[in-house]
Each structure stands twice: as C-alpha cells, then as structure tokens.
Amino acid sequence: MAWHQITVITNEDIAPRLADFFDNLGAVSVTYMDAEDEPVYEPAIGETKIWSNTEVIALYELDAEPELIKTLVYAQFKAEQLRNWKYEEVADQEWERAWMEYYKPMKFAEKLWVCPTDQEQYEAGTVCLTLDPGLAFGTGTHPTTALCLEWLASHDLTGKTVIDYGCGSGILAVAAILLDAKEAHAVDIDPQAITATQSNALKNQVQDKIACYLPEQFTPFQADIVLANILAKPLIDMAEQICNLVAPGGQLVLSGILHEQAESVMNAYQQYIAFNAPVQQEDWIRLDGIKR
C-alpha cells in the first residue's frame, strides 16, 4: 500500500497545532522530526519535546487530496509560519524490519550479547539476549542503556535480587536474569513499558523470574542491586525513595545522566551511597556505588 506524505517545517509553538489540524483533516499518522539537528536531552516525564524548528510529517491514504489539504492548511495558518512544504507518494514497508537493518548484535564485557531476532550469537562463556525494536525505549544502542548493560555483564549477579526502576523495554531486568540473578522486579510509569518487558521476558524464556509493576502496584522492598536508567531530574527528586530500595551493602546503578548533571546527581545520593568513579560514554555518565 502507498501513502500520501506531506512534510512542512514550522516552529515549536505552531507544530502541535499543525499536527492537530492534520489529524482533523484525516491523517493516518502525524510525526515530528528535528529540522536542524538540534539535540534533545531531557524532556520532562510525559512531555513530547518539540524542536525550535520542527518538521511535521503527515501520512494520508491515497483517496485524500493533497492540494486541498494544502489549501486548508494555508487558510488556517500564516504563510510565514510554514516552510518547505513538500508532498510525495511513499510505498508501504515493514518499518520495524527496515529499522533493524541498522540494529546489529552488540557484546558487553565479553559476556553478554544483545541481538535482534535471527541474528543471535552463541559463544562459549556468553549469554544472548534477544530483543527487537518495539513499544518502549531500550535496545542497548543508546549509551545510557549500554553503560548499564556493561555494568551488569561485569559483575557477579549469581543469586542476586534486582530492581529495574524505570524498566522501559525490560532489557536490564532480562539481562540480569540471563546473567544468573535470582529474580528481577521491573517498575515503570508507562503501561506500554510493562507490556514490552513482559514480552521480552517471554521471548528470552525468563518470564518466571521477572515481576512487572506500575508504581502504584509495587510494594517497596530492599534488593541486592537497584538499577535506575531514567533522567537526572527524577533521579534527584527520588533519591531517598530509590536509596530505600537498596539493601545495606547493596549496589546502586544510575544512568540517563549527562556529564554536566553528574555532580548534582551525586550530591543528592552522597549521604546514602559511596560512589565509584563515574563512567562516561559519549556525553552520558553512569554512576554506581554501594549503599552505606
């Protein structure tokens, strides 16, 4: 199946209104793209970050009339608010499979493979986690996740109890079990993350050792290892709450922290955690340490 694709560049104030207008005109989907390679690091939880110059992309079925849509849009918005209007017909494709052409097996600490389906790696002395792009963030390609996977694969998890706080795709919880943790408890505010974690646990045949919760379903307890790969601000805001989940002498791993945010995060946890030296990958920092 083919589609009409309309793209237009506008500013961060107009983009949401334009997206809603496209939707009201029958768009099958509307998405945002960065029009100027502007980095976005830390939107608030639940916020959709809009770039200062945003490309709005609308897909319509072939019975739609692109010229009529353009006329209606220009009647609703000022011409100077809209730039680079483009229209084309695009062929349908399996978008996840197309994306996976760029998603290749990754190895962490010579012990853990993370691989897309049909590209699994089997080596003596390693374990393989099968993961495909899906509903929730976390495939191991981003430095914040990679830093946590490297930590997990570098430590003896045998018999350990793990809490993955802000589990996303569940990649860290699943990895922990494959690396011989006793059990993992995955918590996230997003119901889709819970669904994704359950699916990935099943895919890797570790579903019996992973429990998933929305925050209101989770009864706090103290675990041997707590992983929190979220963002600096919520990490700071929830410092006491997260530290209360770590057993005395247990280990805490924090990620999702930019280099310039590391000191603020460490200060929030300093009374609870004896940190090791920060570990950096690109602009991102991992903090890990032992509960005092």
Image: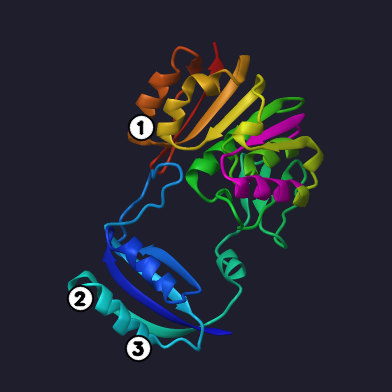
- Residue at figure coordinates x 56%, y 15% from the top left: 291
> What's the amino acid at mark 3?
Glu
> What's the amino acid at mark 2?
Ala
Q: Which of marks 2 and 1 is nearer the N terminus?
A: 2
Q: Which of marks 3 and 2 is nearer the N terminus?
A: 3
Asked if labels 1 and 2 touch by Cβ distance under 8 angstroms, the answer is no
The secondary structure type at the circle numbered 3 is helix
Q: Marks 2 and 1: which is nearer the front?
A: 2
Instruction: Report, in whole angstroms, how far the alpha carbon at label 2 lies from the one at label 1.
Output: 40 Å
Instruction: Report, in whole angstroms, how far the alpha carbon at label 3 lies from the one at label 2.
Output: 15 Å
263 in relation to 213, above or below: above
36 in relation to 43, above or below: below
The secondary structure type at the circle numbered 1 is helix
Q: Where is residue 224 in the image (x, y as percent from the top left)?
A: 67, 21
Q: Mark 2 points at which residue?
A: 79
Residue nearest the viewer, comparing 50 with 95:
50
Asked if labels 3 and 1 touch by Cβ distance under 8 angstroms, the answer is no
> In the rendered structure, which segment of residues is drawn in magenta?
179-201
Q: Name the residue under label 1.
A: 261
Residue nearest the viewer, comparing 158 with 203:
203
Q: Where is residue 4 in the image (x, y as percent from the top left)?
A: 46, 83
Q: How crowded is mark 1: few (under 14 residues within 10 Å), some or many (20 or more)?
A: some
Q: Residues within 10 Å of mark 2 (few under 14, many from 20)?
A: few
Is residue 184 within the magenta segment? yes
- Residue at figure coordinates x 35%, y 88% from the top left: 67
Q: Position of residue 62 (x, y in %)?
A: 50, 87
Residue lying at the far left in this picture: please name it.
Answer: 80
**Figure quadrant of the N terminus:** bottom right
**Figure quadrant of the C terminus:** top right
Q: Mark 3 points at which residue?
A: 67
